[in-house]
Amino acid sequence: MSDAPQSLVPLAPRSQPAPFWRNPWLWVVLAVLGLVLWQWLETRSRLAQTQQELARRLAESDRVVSESRVLVGKAMEQTAELQRKYGAIEARLAEFQDQADALRALQQEAAVSRDDALLAEVEQALNNALQQLQLSGNVQAAILALEAADARLGRHDRPQFLALRRTLARDLERLRATPFVDVPGMNLRLENVIVGLDNLPLALEIKASARPGADVVPEVAQVPWWRLLIEEGWAELKGLVRIQRFDRQEAVLLSPEQSLILRENIKLRLLNARLALLTRDQWLFRSELKAAHAWLERYFQVEEKSVQASLAALKQLAATEIVVELPSLNDSLAALQNLKASREKR
């Protein structure tokens, strides 16, 4: 009996592995690498833009320094001109003083009567008051001179002096009603601003020394590689963020040499203002103070109390009137001349 052929059982087909490009983890890794590459390129681009901005600001700072030097030269020329005018005023004052001394010598040498000597003293007091008003605008000195003249006339109590005393009283009332300009006090406030200028903090300044701890290099062997990688990534991430204020004009970046020139330039402005105060030049006084105020506002930290105090002092000084309309003493001089003429007719 022949063996019957055994039936063949078909085997199940063996499963093929999926293609590698269908692996989702591969796409996740590629996406992460692409994001990291994009962040690196963006960081490099921002760094290049920052370097260009810094170079532009340094060039602008050089231009500001050049303009400041030109302004310093002009300020020095104006200072020389003001000094020349001040010297001319001093010469005139010395000339008037010599004339007063000569008049005093003549009065001592001449043998005149007591009334004539009294009128000569009154005339001298009136001339002194007039000189104080014309040369320096010193109202207080003029008031003292007129009060002294009126006191001399009052001690003699002569009827012929009444008209002159009434005229002196009217001129005294006009002088007392004249606004008082505190020139010594204003000069002292300007001096305080000039002295404190070296200690005012600048808004933005390039430091000459390196950052603290910059020369301390950590040993690479003691720092784990993963920590260095994290610190590098954090530094790159911080470079992507920039905070900037737009509510005011940006401060100019100044080097120590430029800041020194700036402070000296402001001092020259304030010195010019002091000379203008002594010569009663209202326009120059205000223009120099306004220029110094603008530079303090632009280049210094206006949030600091010292800077705010200096700005307030300059603003208050600039608003002060240093030129006032002074009354003349023509009535008193005319009354004195009429009294002397009437005495000569007798």
Image (cartoon, rainbow, N blue to C red):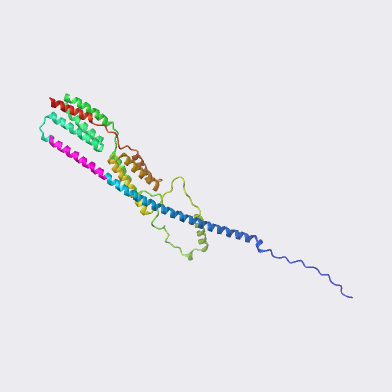
Snapshot quadrant of residue 248: top left
Residue drawn 13% across the image and 27% down it: 344
Relative image position of residue 296 (x, y in whole percent): 37, 46
The N terminus, quarter of image: bottom right
Task: Determine whether, in the image, residue 239 is placed left or right of residue 312.
Answer: right
| Relative depth, front residue between 310 and 96 | 96
The quarter holding residue 115 reads: top left
In the rendered structure, which segment of residues is drawn in magenta?
83-106
x and y percentages locating residue 264 in the rendered image: 33, 49
Q: Main secondary structure of the magenta part?
A: helix
Q: Is residue 98 magenta?
A: yes
Q: Residue 118, how many percent across, how many down? A: 15, 30
Q: Please name the residue shown 54% across and 57% down the image.
A: 39
Q: Mark yes or no: residue 191 visible.
A: no
In the rendered image, the residue lying farthest to the top is 159
Pick whichever, 105 or 346, lies toward us.
Answer: 346
Which of the 4 image quadrants contains residue 284?
top left
Which of the image's four quarters has the C terminus?
Answer: top left
Q: Residue at x 51, y 63 (%)?
A: 225
Residue 214 counted in the magenta span? no
